[in-house]
Image (tube, grey):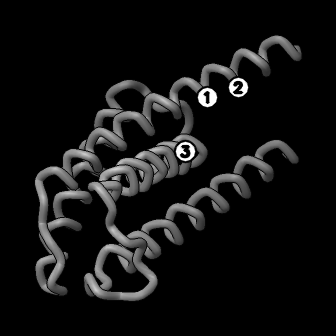
Amino acid sequence: MALKQNRLSSAAISKLLLTGFVLALLTATHLPPNALVLPVEVNNIDKVFHFTAYAILAGLLATSWQLSSGILTSRHLRWVWCAVAIFGALDELTQIAVGRDCSIWDWSADAVGAACGLLAFVWLRRRFIARATEAQ
């Protein structure tokens, strides 16, 4: 029974992290372009920020889902990628209202970042499963 309690608490923690990250991401992406808290754009480095943020988002979403309902299949992971890619597109479109650019290149960095985040999720999951198997 103790194992189930730990699993539930891990699921709850991952959901809180996911929620906090989504709120931070939406806040950061909807600040006006001249906000002092935003990093200065140099040589399109913002694409690295997009890539990284959406890799983290996809990894957190997959982790939360897996901890809540069990091992994700490739079909589940495709749904995660689609959800994150659609979220990225909607995020880009809603930035227009605050005077920020809506860019297909930013969205492309989001989508590629999400795919790489899911690849990292699968790789880490395999490593943890292999370690758990060795320990038994």
Q: What residue type is labelled 2?
A: Phe
Q: SS of the residue at dot 2?
A: helix
* Closer to the eye: label 3 or 1: 1
Q: What residue type is labelled 1?
A: Leu
Q: Where is residue 39 in the image (x, y as percent from the top left)?
A: 42, 72
> Is the residue 103 above or below the residue 1 in the image?
below
Give the residue displayed 54% in from the left and 31% down from the top: 71
In the image, taking residue 121 as reference, residue 118 lies left or right, namely left
- Total marks shown come to 3
Q: On the image, numbered disc 1 is attached to which residue?
A: 124
Q: Where is residue 108 in the image (x, y as percent from the top left)?
A: 20, 45
Q: On the image, numbered disc 3 is attached to which residue?
A: 63
Give the residue displayed 79% in from the left and 52% down from the top: 5
In the image, taking residue 16 as reference, residue 111 lies left or right, namely left
Whichever of labels 2 and 3 marks the residue nearer the N terminus, that label is 3
Q: SS of the residue at dot 3?
A: helix
> Is the residue 36 above or below the residue 29 in the image?
below
Q: How far apart are marks 2 and 1 (CA)?
A: 6 Å
Q: On the image, numbered disc 2 is attached to which residue?
A: 128
Q: Which of 113 and 80 is in front in this view?
A: 113
Q: What residue type is labelled 3?
A: Thr
Q: Which of 9 and 29 is in front in this view?
A: 29
